[in-house]
Amino acid sequence: MTKTVEHIECLIVGSGPAGYTAAIYAARADLKPIMYAGMQPGGQLTITTDVENYPGYPEGIMGPEMMELFRKQAERFGTDVRYGMITSVDLTGKPPFKLIADESHEILAETIIIATGASAKWLGIPSEQKLNGMGVSACAVCDGFFFKGKDVAIVGAGDTACEEASYLAKICSKVYMIVRRDEFRASKAMIHRVLNTPNIEVIFDTETDEILGENKVIGARLKNRKTNELRTIDISGFFVAIGHHPNTDIFKGYLDMDETGYLQTIPGTSKTNVAGVFACGDAQDKVYRQAVTAAGSGCMAALDAERYLAAKTDVSN
Ligand code: NDP
């Protein structure tokens, strides 16, 4: 295939709330952004049902519809949204940075805004996929409210699982916490909180054999890993909190990351260790991970990119 090349001011990689917000700001600042939206445009919100905690939607909105509105708003100001992947990058040397899209198209970008997000890890059992969005969720803060006064289960034993179990315990009648080993991975303070919450029952040494239900979750069959004993619990919601994986692999070796791959930015900014490359959203945030915080950081990234380009122009004039 012949290679085509284009030279642009601002490339946005990723199309969740962070990417689209960056696009709205960058387009309005006349940076003529091009966005590579990935293979699943819209990011994690496209696998969510109702979003009720994003300000401005008093009645809530479906995740995919919300992302469609974000896209329209970004396009209205001139963002070129493309469905495709950035497949390789070269961030050595000075800008423009060279990137390859869809294996064959070369882009030279003066600035890059990384908004590639993170993907929740899943257990990998068929019923989990079948009931995703119908009682199975990877975000207690997003979906816990739908199970008000009901019994739910959460899988995981890290800080996220403990935090989400505590959150769910305030809303739900009972929370079963399914832990695969005989101990937690979370910090002591988090463990203490879980163990001292009366309506959380921790079930150690246990894995999920199957989530039960046809069109909605009605229970889970659990298996003791030491005795192989099976047990069924009646639940309406099943939460998976076994970690996330930031989608940052293509930037390895160029950008500073923590040990789990989250991009590191200069605190209070979206700046990475490479001047001209900015990061926003879940690709650089393992603590808050909300649509609204991602959108806010996307705005920061576009403003940082605009100011970076303006400062360069001032120097060259
Ligand atoms: P972690 O990787 O820390 O924990 C993942 C948990 O999921 C582990 O307990 C692990 O079990 C379990 N797990 C993994 N795969 C499976 C599986 N297939 N079946 C059952 N259980 C499984 O992820 P977190 O998201 O909890 O935390 C990520 C990072 O973010 C950590 O550094 C954490 O400290 C930090 N964080 C900090 C917070 C805070 O400070 N407020 C809040 C949230 C996160 P096992 O232990 O057996 O490996």
Image (spheres, grey):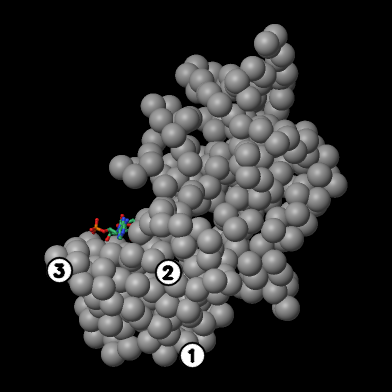
The alpha-carbon separation of the residues under discs 1 and 3 comes to: 32 Å
Using a 10 Å C-alpha cutoff, classify the residue at mark 3 as few (fewer than 14 neighbours), some (14 to 19) or many (20 or more). Answer: few
Q: Which residue is mark 1?
A: 149
Q: Amino acid at mark 3?
A: Thr
Counting every numbered tag in the picture gives 3
Q: Quadrant of ligand 1?
A: bottom left
Expressed as whole percent of the image width and height from the top left, the position of residue 196 reads: 24, 85
Q: Which residue is mark 3?
A: 227
Q: Is residue 256 left or right of residue 42?
A: left
Q: Residue furthest top?
A: 2
Give me the residue at 33% from left, 66% from top: 208
Helix, strand, or loop for circle 1? Answer: loop
Using a 10 Å C-alpha cutoff, classify the residue at mark 2 as few (fewer than 14 neighbours), some (14 to 19) or many (20 or more). Answer: many
> Of residues 62 and 114, which is closer to you in this image?
62
Q: Earlier in the sequence, mark 1 or mark 2?
A: 1
Helix, strand, or loop for circle 2? Answer: strand
* The residue at label 2 has a CB less than 8 Å from ligand 1: no
The alpha-carbon separation of the residues under discs 1 and 2 comes to: 20 Å
Q: Amino acid at mark 1?
A: Gly
Q: Amino acid at mark 2?
A: Ile
Q: Earlier in the sequence, mark 1 or mark 3?
A: 1
Q: Which residue is mark 2?
A: 211
